[in-house]
Image (cartoon, coloured by chain):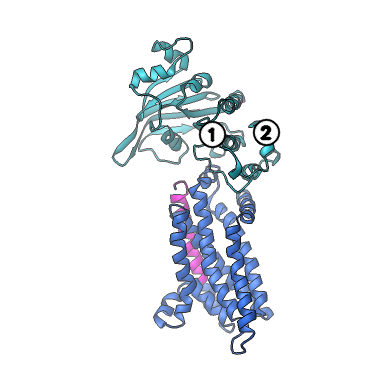
Amino acid sequence: MIQMTNVIKRFGSQTVLTDVSFTAHTSQIFGLLGPSGAGKTTIINILTNQLQADGGSHTIDAAPFETGLMLDEDGLYVRLSCLENLNLFADIYGLPRSRSKEVLESVGLQDAAKKAVSALSRGMRQRLALARAIINEPKVLFLDEPTSGLDPTTARGIHKLINGLRERGSTIFLTTHNMDEAVKLCDHVALLHKGVIVEQGVPKEICERHNAIKTVPDLEAVFFKLTGAELE
Amino acid sequence: MRSAKAIFIRQATDLFKNRLVMVQYIIFPVVAFIFTEMVAKADESIPDYMFVSMFAAIFAGMTLVATTAGVIAEDRENKSLRFLIMAGVKPHEYLLGIGGVILAASFLVSLAFALMGGFSAANFARFLTIMMLSSTASILLGASIGMLVRNQQAATAIGMPVAMILGFGPMLAMFNTTVEKIFSFFYTQQLNVVANDFTVDLTKPITIVLVNIAFLLVLFTVAYRKKGLSA
């Protein structure tokens, strides 16, 4: 479970998060939706103790070594190969190195195992970053814009992987500005606008509340109705 | 220790793939060899080990500071360190992993210097001891700089002048007593003294180097805790 209660964050005189509260339950995919600059990454940084909140509280029912993290900046070692990058974390977590090959296969990068990270495409790097995030089979997984800038096929592969992790009991917290992705993937979503959660709940129910179901639930229309802002 | 070993293996692999850093380790022994063979051995008034001691002191004082600062600043700049910290890696484990590889490389270079110097067995051991202690201090200083600066560019901009002051300071101290007094508190001066005079009692130089190491260790730990996650 991940819980945030009345969290406030300021950078100088600018308040970037105002009374942010939500709960992501165990084995749930929780989506935090909002445009760039809404405060999504700040929330992840606070939840992973990379930033201190100025008010409120947050809890995660997992130890640091039981969490996985995939950020927009992947932090991969560019001169090392895919396998060497994963072996480092397998060694840190005390896992057998065969686990590196397993996760590399699960993200479809087995053929690039010996390729240097510097030679990978953006999509391949993102998949490798995801492989590193799940190498320790985390109880809680944070994904910051996991499919941003990826082609639909690669994005679908990542969605499948995320669903598989949820089925195996992981709690997944993801941020996105892609409303279709949120509707397809998330059990629960929160809409964030200028540091304020303007709506939250089950995606279909939110859309029903705001009469935004046409042929499919249209979260983008809900967001626009509530904030007057476009997502991109 | 598991994390330290993992980072050691990663750093060693990375070092072999990073030719720019490799060149910095090789250049000083090569230059010392050329000077020893072409100048010192041709001139009887110059001791055979003179250029060995000189370049060894510059290597320990400069190269190690600059390369350690660069490696750590790179880890911070591309956020790799953030993922290590999130995986529970502690400051001493990170330092042992990174510093261990650089110290091992420094040992090999120091061994090459010692063999070139043609020292007696006792002086060989003295030379290696002071080189390893000074290398440890330089690695800690470089690591602290790497932690405190914003990026690799800043690591070079700050690390290089600091390394030059430390590396060339002892030479300046030979001509100026005030500079000598000031530099007597720094480990590079002690390295220079011991490497050039094999009759000097080691108690004082080793004590000063150890005090330098203790101070720099505290500096690194504070810097890691404060700046490890930011860049």
Magenta-colored stretch includes residue B162? no
Which badge, 2 or 1, comes first in the chain's sequence? 1
Would you place residue A48 above or below residue B202 in this image? above
Residue A61 in sight here: no
Under circle 2, the secondary element is helix
Q: What subunit carries mark 1?
A: A
Which residue is located at x 41 percent, y 76 percent?
Answer: B182
Q: Main secondary structure of the magenta part?
A: helix
Q: Which residues are magenta?
A: B209-230
Q: Which mark is residue A62?
A: 1
- Say which colour chain B has: blue
Image quadrant where residue A125 sits: top right
Separation (CA) of disc 2 from disc 1: 26 Å
From the image, state whether disc 2 or disc 1 is nearer to you: 2
**Amino acid on which disc 1 is placed:** Ala
x, y percent for residue A149 = 51, 31
Could you tell me which residue is drawn at 43 percent across and 50 percent down?
B226
Tell me: residue A18, above or below residue A185.
below
The residue at which mark 2 appears reads as A105
Q: Picture coordinates of residue A25 (x, y %)?
A: 50, 24
